[in-house]
Amino acid sequence: MPAKKKGKQQEVKSYLGRPTNNVKIGVVGLPNVGKSTFFNCLSALKVPAENFPFCTIDPAVTRTIVPDERFDFLVEQFQPKSRVPAVLTVTDIAGLVQGAHEGLGLGNAFLSHIAAVDAIFHVCREFKDKHIEHVEETVNPVRDLGIISNELVQKDLAIVNAKWEATNKIVKRNIDKIIAPRTLATLTRAKETLEAGKDIRSIQNWTSHDIATLNELTLLTAKPVVYLVNVSKKGFLKNQSKWFPKVKAWCIERSGPNVVVIPFSANFERELVDCKTDEERALIWGTSKSRSFLPKIVRAGYEALGLINFFTSGHDEVRAWSVRSGRTAPEAAGVIHGDFERCFIMAQQYSFAAFKEHGSEVEVRANGLIRDRGKTYIVEDADILFFKHNASGS
């Protein structure tokens, strides 16, 4: 009797950066470009946003709700006692200046704050305001993007050069004939990339060995970036921007055609946040529908981190959990509790689409759409999961 064909097993995705599911994004840019105002719109934390460089020295952290219509639908259906949406962890990092990689402007401390996050909101300033000085004296967001990017490249180059020299000595002494030469090849490629002024993330075909080697170095230019162009309120409302096409062209050239570049107005978002009622928001827009770009920005940051949602749902609680794309069912269980991953038995899984189509878990089960998933199952976005484990010894 012929052996049964095994289904094609999905490969677990390798990421540049930390492999953990507990990831966060940092807000980066020159001083006085609107970083802290933007951060304050995401958070109840009142981060200082005074008009002088380096007003933010210690990074502040907030967790902001990730908008998800699927979660809202589940809450509406189950009417649970508890509802817990997915959140995005955001760190506000003080402004960098030219020479930061050499320690200028408290640069080394701030660069270490960037190293501690897993992705970047890179904010640049298009608006003009005589009351808010620009650290470079004139407004030019393309130049500003180049300044920050160059600082990150130079910092990474110093790290890679040091590692390259140490590894090269090992290869020359013939101490390690297998791993060290491969590591040196990876470092040489990274070194050449940075010397050309390019980011590590701009290279699309790093191997799993390359990624493992580079991840040990916590490189700044390996982190995914969402570019945010802070325009004036007037320009935002009229959908007019002198600089946006030039900024987007620069970002595409640097990071490729799939780069995310979002125009927004920090001042306008602040006005919306400060509104107490829908009527007040309507007075700003002339309509009852808010056009805040914050949900779009938060979702972009969430996706930049490689995060997807899976749900646990019932009348006691509906909860959206965050897990990196490409992770297995036991790893997803570990997001809930480490013992669930260690003592994983199986997961019962069905899709949100199936639930929405059939209206209840009972009907989903009646139509045979609930599956038993084992340890190799790769969790998909919007899966609804129920984990079985023997963490209690039962």
Image: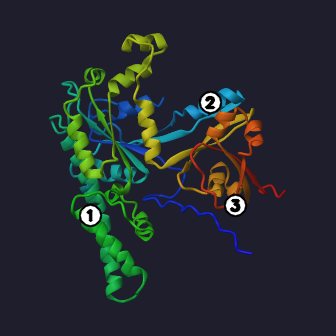
* Badge number at residue 342: 3
Q: What residue is pinned by disc 2?
A: 73
Q: Residues within 10 Å of mark 1 (few under 14, many from 20)?
A: some
The answer to whether residue 131 is above or below residue 149 is above
Report if the CB atoms under discs 1 and 3 are less than 8 Å apart.
no
Q: Amino acid at mark 1?
A: Thr
Q: Secondary structure at mark 2?
A: helix
Quarter holding the N terminus is: bottom right
Question: Foreground: 23 or 73?
Answer: 73
Residue at position x 35%, y 57% in the image: 201
Q: Residues within 10 Å of mark 2 (few under 14, many from 20)?
A: few
Mark closer to the chain start, 1 or 3:
1
Q: Nearer the viewer, mark 2 or mark 3?
A: 2
The answer to whether residue 299 is above or below residue 75 is below
Residue at position x 40%, y 23% in the image: 291
Residue 272 placement (x, y as % from top left): 41, 20
Q: Secondary structure at mark 1?
A: helix
Report if the CB atoms under discs 2 and 1 are less than 8 Å apart.
no
User: 301 left or right of 323?
Assistant: left
Quarter holding the C terminus is: bottom right
Residue at position x 67%, y 37% in the image: 355
Q: In the current view of this chain or complex, which residue is farthest to the front?
A: 1
Q: What residue is pinned by disc 1?
A: 193
Residue at position x 54%, y 52% in the image: 21
Residue 328 placement (x, y as % from top left): 61, 57
The residues tagged by marks 1 and 3 sit, at their Cα atoms, a distance apart of: 40 Å
